[in-house]
Image (cartoon, rainbow, N blue to C red):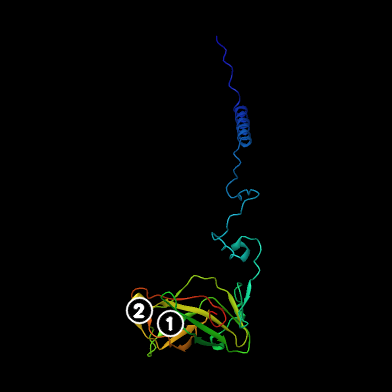
Amino acid sequence: MVYTPRSAPRSARHGALLVGTVAVLGLLTACGDGTSEQGEAPATVSGTAAPATDGTTSPAPPATASSATGTGSPSAPRTTTSPGGATATTAPAATSTRCHTSELRASVGRNDPGAGQENFPVVLTNASARSCTLHGYPGAAFVGASGDQLGPDPKRSPGTPVTVTLKPGQSAWAGLTFSNPGVSGAKTATPAALLVTPPDERDQVKVVWKGGPVPVSGNSSTVRLTVFAPGAGPS
């Protein structure tokens, strides 16, 4: 007769199963991949930027003089003085010192032609009792007797804007140039006036135009303006 051992009690087998399960779980925990459980905050790494909380990014700060020039520090303003005493610097004008249209008187100087070009100085004079500044280009438009504009707006010639400081009675000028219509063959009109707008202003100063016909359309009809410089015109 073959002897067959009796099966282990059920409670003993259940205890052995629990011990094995605990051992397996302990092994898995020791060999984990480092990920956090669901609901925990993600781990951060030193030296990295934190993620944006609302999906937006802050705008970059505006460029400064030092970052634009690459020198590491703002360049010192460069100042020049005209024979009339007006000064110009390369630093931009402060808003509080800007010359307003109501403080200025406008005029157009004599033509200084050359190489088929007509060159007129557009002059703004400080008629106020305080010092003020001009920085950049004027606006300009030729108009007829009825006030209608003749030709397109002038374009800006390349140049480096400077801040011109005007004491009471001092002037600054910008060049208004165009090709001689008799040479270029452009279609012409004779304006009644030139409307001049100071930099960063909306109001205009009206100047009677005495310079004769100007190009308004066709070949080489572009009129150009230069930046303001100290004085009343080229010496």
Q: Residue at x 62, y 37 (%)?
A: 29
Q: Position of residue 178 (x, y in %)?
A: 42, 77
Of residues 82 and 168, which is closer to you in this image?
82
> Crowdedness of circle 2 by 10 Å Cα count: few (<14), some, many (20+)?
few
Q: SS at mark 2?
A: helix
Q: Residue at x 41, y 83 (%)?
A: 142
Q: Residue at x 58, y 21 (%)?
A: 7
Q: Position of residue 12 (x, y in %)?
A: 62, 27
Quadrant location of residue 95?
A: bottom right
> Crowdedness of circle 1 by 10 Å Cα count: few (<14), some, many (20+)?
many
Query: Up-down: is 37 above or below 143?
Result: above
Q: Position of residue 229 (x, y in %)?
A: 56, 77
Q: Point out the residue furthest to the top here.
A: 1
Of tags 1 and 2, the one toward the viewer is 2
Label located before the other in sequence (1 or 2): 1
Marking on residue 199: none
Of residues 100 and 85, which is closer to you in this image?
85
Provide the residue designation for mark 1. Answer: 141
Q: SS at mark 1?
A: strand
Provide the residue designation for mark 2. Answer: 182
Q: Amino acid at mark 1?
A: Ala
